[in-house]
Image (cartoon, grey):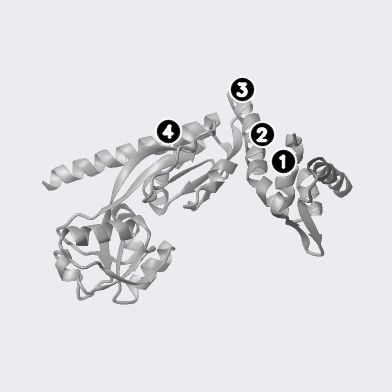
Amino acid sequence: MPDPAALVLLAEIADAGSVTAAARQLGSSQPAVSKQLRRLEESLGVTLFERGLRGVQATEYGLALLPRARAIRSQARQAGEDVQQRRGHKEGRLVVALSHFATMALLPQVIPAFRLRWPGVQLNIVPPSFQLGGLREGAPDFAVMSLPAEQLGPEFVTRALYATTVSVVVRPGHALQNAESLSQLVGAQWVLPSLESSVARGLDRAFQQAGLASPQCSVTCQTLTGLETLARHSDLVAAMPMEVHESRMQASGLCRVPIQETIDGARVAIVRWSDAQPTPAGEELEESFVQAAYELAREQARARGRGA
């Protein structure tokens, strides 16, 4: 059975790109790290890295081991942090994957109290990956994101937070700025995050329910600023979560089209690897996102009640 410490070393070398860089990050010497790597390769009977002038490249055997090696490294780090945090130390590291919605609608309510409670925790925020493989490897620790169309397998734990609504937005002075129904948007050219996004799926579903032909998407843009820029400087019609538009409308300069139909958007949830055991800091951060989402839902319900 491979030495777990050696597998951690494997992950460090792969991520650093060379034995020398890995040794530097580990505070060790290059000969010592090379010796540990040779021992691991000899115990397995395979070559894990191809050496070259520009560093190392994982072989097929190295690539096969990397997800497990990274998971062991993450679990070892979290185990140490878990004990220290339970002893009262407010330090550690968390990597959280946040969608645009989570970043704009939830994070402002979450971060002040969390920073006050955990001042020594290094918080790294990254965009979510729909492959979700990083959750097994502990990077990120968890995600707050739109659930994909296909049902996630039992290796993931999900906790539903919020159901978004899609807003249709255009530049000021657009010919469709005052459209009141989806039927008036037939024939428009759209810019969407992607054809597989929850926004695109919700839009297509709304057109189908209205008995209309599917919207024509001529441009996709996965960055929010890029999507806003395209809509602001062209006749393209954009769609995005209502909560994202409301938080960005002053900066983006885009106007919401007042259509009567409701367009259901993404179902937002916390997603993590089922075998992962969050540290006290991670557990508290998860719960903070849950409470922020629930409060946002209550605010939206009160707003709809006042509108009625």
Q: From the viewer's perspective, is the residue at label 3 or at label 4 nearer? A: 4
Q: From the viewer's perspective, is the residue at label 2 or at label 4 nearer? A: 2
| Mark 4, residue position | 287
The amino acid sitting under disc 2 is: Ala
Residue 39: % across, % down: 84, 42
Of the two numbered discs 1 and 4 on the same chain, state the one appearing first in sequence. 1
Label 2: which secondary element: helix
Residue 66 sits above or below residue 51 on the image: above
- The disc at residue 87 is 3
The amino acid sitting under disc 3 is: Arg
Mark 1 to mark 3: distance in Å? Answer: 25 Å
Residue 110: % across, % down: 42, 40
Can residue 240 be spotted in the picture? no
**In which quadrant of the rendered view does residue 139 lie?**
top right
Residue reaching furthest to the top:
87
Q: From the viewer's perspective, is the residue at label 2 or at label 3 nearer? A: 2
- The disc at residue 8 is 1
Mark 2 to mark 4: distance in Å? Answer: 23 Å
Asked if marks 2 and 3 touch (Cβ < 8 Å), the reply is: no
Asked if marks 1 and 2 touch (Cβ < 8 Å), the reply is: yes
Q: For the residue carrying disc 3, how many other residues have a C-alpha within 10 Å: few (<14), some (14-19), or many (20+)?
A: few
Asked if marks 1 and 3 touch (Cβ < 8 Å), the reply is: no
Q: Looking at the picture, tell me which residue is in the foreground, 15 or 295.
A: 15
